[in-house]
Amino acid sequence: MNEALTQEQIQALVETANNGLFTANNTWMLVATVLVFIMHLGFATLEAGFVQKKNVVNILFKNAMIISVGILSYFLCGFNLMYPGEEFAGGFFGFAGFGVSPSPDYTPIAYTDGAYTYWTDFIFQAMFAATAATIVSGAVAERIKLESFLLFSIFLVTISYPITGMWQWGGGWLAELGFHDFAGSTLVHAVGGAAALVMAVLLGPRAGKYTKDGGINAIPGQSMPLAAIGVFLLWFGWFGFNGGSVLSGDPEGTSLVFVTTALAASAGAIGAFLTSYIMLKNYDLSMVLNGILGGLVGITAGADVIAPNLAILVGFVAGVIIPISIVFFDRMKVDDPVGATSVHLVCGIWGTLAVGLFGGKSFVAQLIGTFSVIAFTLVFSFIVGYAIKAIIGLRVSAEEEAKGLDIGEHAMIAYNRA
Amino acid sequence: MNEALTQEQIQALVETANNGLFTANNTWMLVATVLVFIMHLGFATLEAGFVQKKNVVNILFKNAMIISVGILSYFLCGFNLMYPGEEFAGGFFGFAGFGVSPSPDYTPIAYTDGAYTYWTDFIFQAMFAATAATIVSGAVAERIKLESFLLFSIFLVTISYPITGMWQWGGGWLAELGFHDFAGSTLVHAVGGAAALVMAVLLGPRAGKYTKDGGINAIPGQSMPLAAIGVFLLWFGWFGFNGGSVLSGDPEGTSLVFVTTALAASAGAIGAFLTSYIMLKNYDLSMVLNGILGGLVGITAGADVIAPNLAILVGFVAGVIIPISIVFFDRMKVDDPVGATSVHLVCGIWGTLAVGLFGGKSFVAQLIGTFSVIAFTLVFSFIVGYAIKAIIGLRVSAEEEAKGLDIGEHAMIAYNRA
Amino acid sequence: MNEALTQEQIQALVETANNGLFTANNTWMLVATVLVFIMHLGFATLEAGFVQKKNVVNILFKNAMIISVGILSYFLCGFNLMYPGEEFAGGFFGFAGFGVSPSPDYTPIAYTDGAYTYWTDFIFQAMFAATAATIVSGAVAERIKLESFLLFSIFLVTISYPITGMWQWGGGWLAELGFHDFAGSTLVHAVGGAAALVMAVLLGPRAGKYTKDGGINAIPGQSMPLAAIGVFLLWFGWFGFNGGSVLSGDPEGTSLVFVTTALAASAGAIGAFLTSYIMLKNYDLSMVLNGILGGLVGITAGADVIAPNLAILVGFVAGVIIPISIVFFDRMKVDDPVGATSVHLVCGIWGTLAVGLFGGKSFVAQLIGTFSVIAFTLVFSFIVGYAIKAIIGLRVSAEEEAKGLDIGEHAMIAYNRA
C-alpha cells in the first residue's frame, strides 16, 4: 500500500478530499442563496395580496426595484460597511471602501476554512440585506411616493442595516458582549420592522382607515391566493435563510436548523389559529398566515441552539402574539396594511429574547443587543424619513391615494379583465 | 511521501474525506426536503384553482393548517410509529414513544452510513407525511367542515399513514415480502387517494353536481392559472420527492430518478392530451395538468428501477388513465372536485403494479402490497370518517354550502376587486 | 500511521474522497436542473399575465405541453444530435442515433471527470432545450393554432436548436473558432428569440393592434401579478441556468456566476427603469420586469468571464435596450405580446458581443458565432414556419381570435368568478 500511492497521488488525494468538502459546503450556501432570493417573490405576492386592487402594480414595482437596488447598494457600499475586516475601528463602525472585490482583477478567493468563497459570502449576504428593505414596503403600502420609498430603502440597506449588522456579524461590540442572533430575528427582521414602524407613523394611516369617532375600518386585501402563495414561498425560502446561516453545509447544524424552523412555523400557525379564534370567533386566514411568519421570525435568532420541543414553544408564543399585536397596533392607529410590524418587529424581539430563555445564552446580553439595534434603527429611520418628508414629501396626494397608485404613478392597472 | 503525512494529517484527511461525502449527501437530502415542502404550495394552488370562487379562502386555510398540523403530529407521534426501530414488534406494528429525539438533550446524531443525520431523516419524512393528508383536502373540498377535516387529517397522519408506511419503509412485513415502492406510489399517494375516496363518499357530492335525472353538471374551477401553477410546483417538488427517496446524493441513483421522473411526467401529459382529445374533442387543460400528475404518481414506485424508455410507457399509460378514471368516478357519482382519487389512488395502483411489470420485481408482491395497504387505509378511513360524521358531523349546512365556506367558516372572501 | 492504514483502508479513503467530490458536483447539477425546470413555470405565468383574459387557458396549455414535448423530443433525438460524440462529422452536423442511453440496459454511467453522470447531463440539457421553444410561445400568443405551434416547437427542439448548439457545446466549428457563449445568450436565447421573430412576422399582428392610419393600440395584459411572478421565477431559475453551466459545483466558478448574474439582473431593472421613465414619463412595470430579463439574457454569455463591476454595465445596457427595442419592433409592426424578441434576441446578441468587449474574448469570433447561429435559426424557422403555414395554416380564424382561443381551442375559460 505505501508503495501504491506516490507523492503525487497523495497530493491529489488531499486535494480531492478538501475540494469535496469545500464544494459540498459551498453548494449548500448557493442553494441557501437562491432560497433567500425567492423570499423576495414571497414578499411581493404577500403584499400584493394584502393591498387593494388599485395599488397592486405599485407594490409589485416596489418589490422588483427593491431587490435590484438592494443588491447594487450592498455591492457598492453595504457589504464593506458590514464586514469591514481589517479596516475595523472600535467595534461600532468600520468601512473597507466602495465596491466589492477580494482582488484588483476580481479573482474569486476561497476562504481558508473551506466553507465558501468570497463571492458566495457576498451574494448570500446581499440577499439578506435586501430583505430588510422589503419588510418596510408592506407597512407603507398604498400611500407612499415611489421615489421617497426607494430613497429611504437605499439609506437603510446602504448604511443602517450594515452598521448594526456589523455590531454582531462583523465582529463588533455585540459579538464581544455574547449576544446571540443566529440568522437575524433582530439584525434583519426587527431592523426591517422598526424601520417599517417609523415610516408607517411618519406617513399616517390610509384615508378612511380610522374614523373620527374612533372606529376602525377593515380594508380587506384584494387576493387571498396571492397572500397565501407569499407565505408558503417565505417559509420555503426561510429554510435557506436559517439553513444558510450555519455558514456551511455541516450536516448536524443544517438539519437541526431545518427541524427547529419547520416546527416553529407550524406552531406559529396553531398559536395564531387558536388565539384569533378566541379573539375574533372565526377562522381567520390572514392571522394564520401571519402566525406562520411570526413563528419563523421568532425562531430565527435561536434556530441553532433551541431544542426542537422548545422551538415548538417559541413558535407557538409567536403565533399567539400575532393577533394580539395586530389588534394593538390597529388600536394605536398605526396603519400597517400587511402586519409587518407585528410579524417582524414584535416577533423579532420575542425570538431574540427567547434565546436568553431557552437557548442557554445570557438574557441580559439578548436584551442589550435587541434594544440597542432597534434603538439605532428607530433613530436612523426617523431622521432619514423625516428629512425625506421635509424635502420631497413622503405621501402621494389625497386624489392619487383615492384613485390608486397604479394609475397615479404607473398609468396602468393590475388586472384587465373587462 | 510517507514522511510527508503525520499521523494527525492522516486522521484529518480521513475526516475530511468522510465529512465531504457526508455533507454532500446530507445537502442533497435537505434540498429534497425543501422541494417536498413546496409541493404543499402546489397542492394549495391546484386546489384553490379548481374550486369555486366562494370556497377559495377555505381551501387555502386547510392547506396552511395541514402542513402545520402534519409536521407537528408527525413529530409528536407519527415518526416513531413509522420507524419504531428496536421497539419493533411482529412486522405489523411498533412504537418508539411520543416525541422525537435521538438523545435526551436533542443532540443531533449522524447515522453511521454517513448519508444524513437523524434530524434530516425526520424532517424529510415529516414533509412526506403531511402530503398524504393534503391529498384528501382536494377531494372533500367545498363541503366539509373545517374542524372535521382537521380531525380526520390528524388521525391519518398520526396513525394510519405511519402504520402502513412502517410495513415497508420501517422494515415491516411488506419489506420482507419483497414489495418495492420506491417513493410511495402506494404508501403515500394511494394512501392519500384511498382516504380521499372514502371521505368523498361519506360526504356525498356537492349540491347541484348530479341531477335527479342522471345528469352531471360540470362545476368549473375559478382560476386556471392557479391550477397550472400548482401542477408545475408539484412537478418541481417531485424531483425532491423521488430524488430524495434515494436517501443519499448518490450521483447514479439520483440522476436516473430525475430522468425517469421527468420522462414519465412528460409522457403523462401526452397520454392525457390524446385520450381527452379523443373522448372530449377538445384540448382540455385540466386533463393535461392531471395527466402530468398522473405520470408523476405512476413513476413514483419504480423511479429507481424502471429504465427511461419504459418510464415513458408508465407515464403515458397513467396519462391515458386520467380522463377515463375521472369520467368513471363522475359516472359513479363520486364527486371529487380536483380529481384526487384518479390521480393519486388509481395512478398510484398502476405505478406500483408497473414495478412488477417493468421494474424486475415480483408482480405478486406488488399486488399484495398495494392492496393490503389500500385495504387498511380504506377501513381505517371509513371507521374514523364515520365516527366523526356520527359525533360532530362532516358536512356544512346546505345554506353555508350555497353561500360558500369562505363566508360561512372564515367571514371573508378571496378576492376584493369591486 | 503507515501501519494504521491497510491497503483496503487506503482504497476506501480514495473512493470516499472521489465520491464526496463527485456527489457534491452532481448534486449541484441536479439543483441547477430543477431551477431551470421551474423557469418553465416562470415563462408560463409571465405569458399568462401579459396576454388577454380570453387567451389565458391557451397559453397555459401551450406551456404545459411544450415542456413535456420538449423533454421527450430531446430524449428521442435532440440530445444525440447536439452531443454526437464519436459520431461527429465535420463540425457542422453529427448524430448518435435515436433515443438516449449510455448502454443497452440503461445503466447509469459516471463521466470520468467526476463532475456528473450521463443522466445528469441529459436531464440538465433537456431542460435547456425546452426553454428555446418556450420563448417562442410568448411572441406568437393570442393568434396561433395550437397544433401548428406544437409542430413548430418539435422541429425547433429536435433539429434546429441541437444543430447550432452542437457547433459550440458539442465541440463543433464555433468551439474551434474560439467563440464563447457560456450559458447561451446566443445558443439558447437568441435562437428562441430569432424563431419567435420569424413566427411573429409569418403570423402577422393581432387583430386591432395596428390601425390603418398608422396608430398602435396597446393591448394590456390581464394580470400584472402573474407577470411579476413569472419574472421572479425566471430570475430564480437563472441561478441554475447560469450556475449549472459551470458543469460542476466548482465553488469559485459557481459563486462568481451567481454574483455576475444577480448584478446584471439588478442593473437591467435600473436601466429599463430610467430609460422607460425618460421615454414614457411614468414608472412602467412591464419595462422594469423585461429589463430584469434583458439583464439576465445579457450576462448569460459571459457570466463566467466578465468581472462583477462590468456585469453591472452589461446588465444596465441590456436594460436600456429593452424599452428602445420594444418600441422599435412595435413601430415595425412586429406584434410580440410579451416582448420576447427584444428580451431574448436583441439582448442575446448584445450579451454575446459584450463577451468580446468585456470578457477578454475575440470580438470577431463573437460576431461570427452570433450571426451564424441566428442566420441558421432564421432560415430554418422560416422554412418550417412557411411550410406549416402552407400546409395546415398558422393562424386561428378571425372569429376565434375575437372570441378568444380559450373558448375556440379549449372550450373553457380561465376564470370563473361570476
Image (spheres, coloured by chain):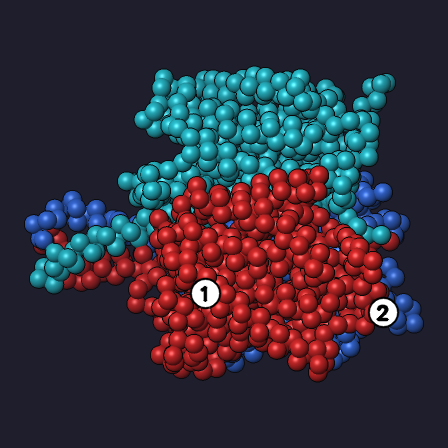
Chain colours: A blue, B red, C cyan
Residue B341: image x %, image y %?
A: 62, 59
Residue underneath mark 2: B399
Residue underneath mark 1: B369
Residue B25: image x %, image y %?
A: 37, 57
Image quarter where the N terminus of chain C lies is bottom left
Depth check, mark 2 against mark 1: the one in front is 1
Question: What kind of element bears circle 1?
Answer: helix
Question: What kind of element bears circle 2?
Answer: helix
Q: Residue at x 64, y 17 (%)?
A: C386
Q: Residue at x 66, y 54 (%)?
A: B328
**Does the rendering let one see residue A336?**
no
Tag 2 and tag 1, C-beta contact below 8 Å: no
User: Which image quadrant is residue A219 in?
Assistant: bottom right
Residue C389: numbered disc: none
Question: Mark 2, chain letter?
Answer: B
Q: CA distance from mark 2 to mark 1?
A: 43 Å
Looking at the picture, which amino acid does disc 1 mark? Gly
Q: Is residue B217 left or right of residue A150?
A: right
Do marks 2 and 1 share a chain? yes
**Does the rendering let one see residue C3?**
yes
Residue B16, placed above or below residue B323: below
- Work out which residue is located at the far right of the displayed protein and give it: A213
Q: Residue at x 65, y 27 (%)?
A: C148
Density class for disc 2 (Cα within 10 Å; few <14, some 14-19, many ≥20) is few
Residue A353, placed above or below residue B121: below
Density class for disc 1 (Cα within 10 Å; few <14, some 14-19, many ≥20) is many
